[in-house]
Image (tube, rainbow, N blue to C red):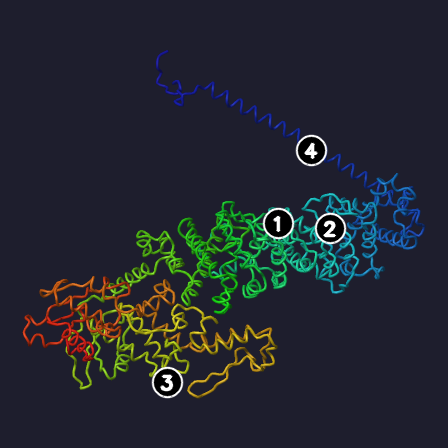
Amino acid sequence: MFFSGDPSNRKRVDLGGRSTKERDRKNLLEQTRLERNRRLWLRQQNSAALRIQKCFRARKVVRIEQSKLREKFLRIYGKNCPNVDRNAFGPDSDFLRQFLYFFNAENIDDFLVLVQICRLLLKCVQENGDVVSLFAGVDYSSICALVNYRVKKLAYTCIRAVHHNRNQLKDQLLLTPNESSASAIPLLEVLVLLLDLKLPWSCKIVGYLSQNNGFGLLREIILMGKDNANREKGSSLERVLTVVMCHIGQKPCLCSDIDPRYSFSSQILTIPFLWHVFPNLRQVFARQGLSQHYIHLMATSVPNLISFLPKDISDEFPTYACLLGNILETGGVALSQPDCSFNMAIDLAAVTTFLLEAHPSLTRSDSRENSMIAEDDMAGDDEVMEVALDKKLDQQICNSIDTRFLLQLTNILFREISSANGPDDMEVAAVGAVCGFLYVIFNTLPLERIMTVLAYRTELVPMLWNFMKRCHENKKWSSLSERLSYLSGDAPGWLLPLAVFCPVYKHMLTIVDNEEFYEQEKPLSLKDISSLIILLKQALWQLLWVNHTSSANSVRSIPVRTSSKKLSMEAVQQRVSIVVSELLSQLQDWNNRRQFTSPSDFHADGVNDFFISQAVIENARANEILTQAAFLIPFTSRVKIFTSQLAAARQRHGSQAVFTRNRFRIRRDHILEDAYNQMSQLSEDDLRGLIRVTFVNEFGVEEAGIDGGGIFKDFMENITRASFDVQYGLFKETADHLLYPNPGSGMIHEQHLQFFHFLGTLLAKAMFEGILVDLPFATFFLSKLKQKHNYLNDLPSLDPELYRHLIFLKRYEGDISDLELYFVILNNEYGEQTEEELLPGGKNLRVTNENVITFIHLVANHRLNSQIRQQSSHFLRGFQQLIQKDWIDMFNEHELQLLISGSLDSLDVDDLRQHTNYAGSYHSEHIVIEIFWEVLKGFSMENQKKFLKFVTGCSRGPLLGFRYLEPLFCIQRAGGNASEDALDRLPTSATCMNLLKLPPYKSKEQLETKLLYAINADAGFDLS
C-alpha cells in the first residue's frame, strides 16, 4: 500500500522494550486481583452484618426474658422482699438465681431490691452466724460449684451497683457500718462478709473480681468518695479493702497469681493519699507479711511496672507518683518492724528506686545542684513539657524519705554483711540496692536533709569503702547496672558506688575536725585515704580522658522516662566525674594542711606533652579536664599553662610596647597614697598595659635610672609591703603571721572597701606581670579568691583558741544547756564590743545537745566567712579585673600562695649559676666568677633575697626556676681594668635586664664586703 500522506496510520513503536501484549497481561492480572479483593470484602461485610444482627437479636431476646423474669420476681417476692426468709439464699431456691440473671445496675428498682437483699442477708447471718450453711445447706462440698458461682456473682453485682451509682452515693461511701440506713453500706458490708478468708469461696471471689476488673471498679469508687467531708475511721469501704488486701496466696488464702494490670497493687495502691483516706488500712498493710508480699510482686515486675499501672488521674497526679507516695509512707513502718527481712529491704529499694527515677524532681535538681550541667537551649519537636506534681503529693514523697527511713533501710541492708572475704552475692545486692536508691534520692531531694544522717548515723562510708577497696585490690568489680534502669550492662562496677560514696564522704569532711581526721583517723585511716585517692584518680581519668563521652554542657536536662538510655548513662558519668573531682579536691586540701600522702598521688599517669599542648585549646578534652580536675595535672605543668595565658594576655594588651601612656611619679615616703590615687584612675585596659614608674626620694629629687621593668618591679614590692602591712589597718595577722582582711577595717578607714578593691587590683597586677611578692596570706582568705566557702577545719589557722573551745563543746558529755550558751557571738574590735545573732531570734535560743553541732558551725562560719565578707568581696572584684577566675581555678589555695610569693625555700644558687650568662671577658670558670658564687652561697637567706632584689628588682626567684627568668641573669665585668679606682667601686645592677655589673675584685673578702654593702645600701636606683 502506498503512502497516502496521513501519519496517523503509522505503526507505533514502544521504546520501553515491552510488547503491548505483555502490558495488557499485567493490567488484566491486576484487575483480577482487585476484583477478588472486592468480592472478599463484600463477603466479610455480609458476615459481619449477620453476626451483628444475630448478637442484637440475642441481646433483645435476653432483655425481654429479663424483663419477664423481673416482673415475675417482683410479683412473688415484692419490691422490699417482705416474703423472703433465710431459705431464699439456699441452693434449692431460685431467688438469687433469678435476681442475678435480670439485675441491671442502670435500673434503680433493681438497685433498691439489691440493697434489700443485702440487708436481709446480713440480718440472717447476724441471727445465725453460719454463712456457709446459709448458701450451701448441710453439704457444701457436693454443690460447691453452684454456691461459688452464686456468691462471686453476688459480690461482683454489689461492686457494679455501687460503681454505677457512685456519683449519687459519694456522700455514703466512707460511712461506717453503723450507718446501715445508707444504701451503699449494706452492699459494701456483704462484700466484707463474702470475702472473709475463713470462707471456702473467698479466694474464688477475688479471682473472679480480678478477671472482671473488680479492683478497677473499686478504684473508681474510692476516687469518687475520697474527698468526702464525712470521712470516718473504720468505714465499710475500708473494711472491704482490708479483707481484699489480705488475699496474698499464703495460708489460709489459696488465691492464684493475678494479672499485674488488674491487681490490688496496680489499681488500689495507686490511689492518691490512700492511707490518709483509710488510716486503719495503712496499719494492716504495714504488717510484715502483707507489705513484703505486695512490694515483692512489684519488684519482680520492675522493668515493666509503669506499663502495668492505670492511666493517670491528671497531669498533677501521675499513677507512678501516687504509688510511690503510698509505698514510701508505709515503707518506714515496715522497716521499723523488728522482723523486717533483708529481702524486704532489697525489694523496697528496687521499687522505690525505679519509681523515683520517673520523678520530675530528678530533672529539676540536676539543673539546680549541678552547675556544670547547663540546660540545652535547643528545642525539638520531641521535647517533653514537664508538668509539676501536685504540691501535697510531692510533699508526701519528700517527707516519707526522712532520716529515720534512710537510717533503717541502710542498717537493715548492711547489718548481715561480712567484709572478711571478697564481696559475696548478698553484699553485692545490698550495695547495689543502697547505691541505686541513694543516687536517685540525691537527685530528687534537698541534700542537706539527708547527708548528715548518712554520714554520721549509718555505716555507709566505711561499708562502701570496704566494698570498693576489696574490688579494687582483686581487680574485679561486680556489675550493679541492673540497679538503675538507664545504666547499660557494660557500665563500670565502680560507677554507682562512687556516685553515692563521694558526696556523703565529702559532706562528712566538712564536719569532721582535724583531730578526728589526722589523729583518730575517723572514719577512714590515712592509709585507706591514700588508697582511696589512687582509686578516685584512676576512675576520674577513665571518665574524663579514656572513656570520655561528651562535654558536661551537652548533657540535656531530660526526665529519665523520656530520655534515651545512652543519654541518661552519660548524665550519670558526668555526675560521677563531678562528685569524684570535688572529693579529690577536698582531700587535696586536707593533704595540704598536713601531708599524709605524696602530692604526686593526685596526678594522673597519662599527662604528657601532647596533653599539655591540648590543654590550652578551648573546648578540647584536655582543656575540660584542666577546668574540672586540674589537680590531675602536675603543678609545674599548670604553672606553664598559666604563664602562657598571662603572656598571651599581655601581648594582646600591648605590654610589650616600647612606649606607654601610663607613667607614675611615686614619692617613696608617700608610696601608698600616690599609688592609690594614680592607679585608681586607670581603666581595665590601662591596668593590663605597661606602667612605668619614676621614684622621687625624700628630698623631692627623681632617682636615677630609666624604668625598663626593673623599677616597676621594685615599686610593686614596696607598694605591696606597705599596703598589706598590718600597721595600716586593712589586714591583720594570724598567730602564724598569715594575712587576712581586718574585720574592723571600717573603724580605721572610712573608704576601706575602696582600698580593698585597690589592693585586689594591686595583687592581680603583680601576678599579671609575673612579679612574685612576699605576702603570706591565710588559707581561708585565699579560698575567697576561688569563691569557696570556709568550714570548721579552717578555723585553727585564724583562731586556735576558739577552735579548741568549739571542739570542747562538740565532745562535751554533760548537758550543754547548763553552760548557758545562746546563738549569739560577741565581736570585739578595738575595744568596742557588739553582739550579733547567729540565727534570727538567737538571743533567746539556748545551745543544747541537739543543736550544738549547728552552733559550732555557725560560729566558725561567722568568723571565717561572714565577718570578712564585704572586704573579701571588694578585694575579689579588684583582683578579677586582671586575673580571670578560670586561670586561678587551676590551683588550690596552697598552690595559689606559691603563685603569689614563690617558694619559701632559700635561693637555689646552683640553679641560678646553671642559668647565668656572662659578658665583658667573664666566663663560667673565671676566678672572679668562682669567688662570686662561693660568696653568694655563703650568704644568709635574708642576704640572698636582698641580692636577688638588687639584680632583678624582686626578692623572689621565678616559680619554676631561673631558666624562666626573662631575660636570663647576666654578670658583666665593670671597671674595664683592675686599677685601684676600678676595684674601689661597688657592684651595680640593671634590674630591667637582670644584669649585675661586677668589678674584678682580687679577694673573696673584698668581693663579699663590697657586695654586702651594695645590697644593703637601700639607695633605691641611685647605685645603678
Query: Which disc is residue 894 wearing?
Result: none
Q: Secondary structure at mark 4?
A: helix
Q: Secondary structure at mark 3?
A: loop
Q: Is residue 951 depicted above or below 278 in this figure?
A: below
Q: Earlier in the sequence, mark 3 or mark 1?
A: 1
Quick check: 779 left or right of 382? Answer: left
Under mark 3, the amino acid is Glu
Q: Earlier in the sequence, mark 4 or mark 1?
A: 4
Under mark 4, the amino acid is Ala
Residue position marked by numbered label 4 in the rendering: 48
Residue position marked by numbered label 3 in the rendering: 750
Residue position marked by numbered label 2 in the rendering: 217
**What is the CA distance from the residue labelled 4 to the residue labelled 1?**
37 Å
Q: Earlier in the sequence, mark 4 or mark 3?
A: 4
Closer to viewer: mark 2 or mark 4: 2
Under mark 2, the amino acid is Leu
Q: Residue 876: image x %, image y %?
A: 37, 72
**What is the CA distance from the residue labelled 3 to the residue labelled 2?**
77 Å
Query: Which disc is residue 306 wearing?
Result: 1
**What is the CA distance from the residue labelled 2 to the residue labelled 1?**
20 Å
Residue 119 quadrant: bottom right
**What is the CA distance from the residue labelled 4 to the residue labelled 3?**
97 Å
**What is the CA distance from the residue labelled 3 to the residue labelled 1?**
66 Å
